[in-house]
Image: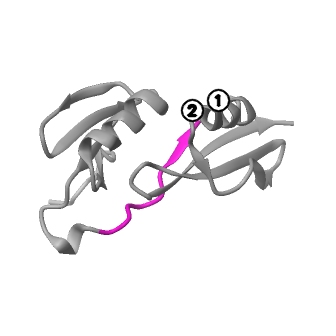
Amino acid sequence: MSIEIQKVGQIGIPVKDVNRALEFYKDILGLPMLFNTDTMAFFECNGVRLLLSLPEKEEFAHPSSVLYFQVENINDTYEELQDKGVSFIDNPHLIAKMGNVETWMAFFKDSEDNTHAIMSEVEV
C-alpha cells in the first residue's frame, strides 16, 4: 500500500485574539467564513480551508507559514487593502519572470503579526 497525498485540505494559522483575527480575515481580506467558536474560526479560500485558532499549547504559539493569496490585479488589491488599514512590508514588486509571465508580490502583516503576501501572475 502506498500513500497518496491528494491535496492540502486545511492550513492552521495561530492567533492571539480570535475576534480581532476574524475581523481581519473576514472584513478586510474578504474571505468567506464557514463558522467560528470562542477559540477558532474557519474560512474558505477557493478549496483550501483556513483555520484560525488560539494555540492549544505554548509550542504552537509561533508565527504561521507565509500564505500567498493569488489576486487578479496586485496593484488594485494592494491599494484596496492599504485603504482598509493593512500594514504592508513592501510595495508590489517583480519576483520572477518565466517566459512571458511575471510573478509579482507584496508582503503584509495580518492582525496577529503573521506575514503573508498577495501575488499576481501577469502575462507580458
- Name above or below for residue 99 compared with residue 77: below
Residue sitting at 71 percent across and 29 percent down?
76
Give the side of residue 46 with respect to residue 40, left or right: right
Give the amino acid at mark 1: Glu
- Magenta highlight: main SS: loop
The disc at residue 22 is: none
Alpha carbons under labels 2 and 1: distance apart:
6 Å
Return the residue at label 1.
Answer: 80
Picture quadrant of residue 9: top left
Picture quadrant of residue 47: top left
- Callout 1 secondary element: helix
Q: Quadrant of the C terminus?
A: top right
Q: Please report contact status of discs 2 and 1: CB closer than 8 Å, yes or no.
A: yes
- Name above or below for residue 101 compared with residue 89: above
Residue 58 appears in the picture as rendered: yes
Give the side of residue 31 with respect to residue 77, left or right: left
Q: Position of residue 80 (x, y in %)?
A: 64, 29
Residue with the most extreme right position: 124
What residue range appears in magenta? Answer: 62-70
Check residue 66 for magenta coloring: yes
Give the side of residue 102 with respect to residue 24, left or right: right
Q: Position of residue 3 (x, y in %)?
A: 22, 58
Residue sitting at 33 percent across and 47 percent down?
8
Return the residue at label 2.
Answer: 84
Residue sitting at 14 percent across and 60 percent down?
1
Give the amino acid at mark 2: Lys
Residue with the most extreme bottom position: 59
Residue 47 appears in the picture as rendered: no
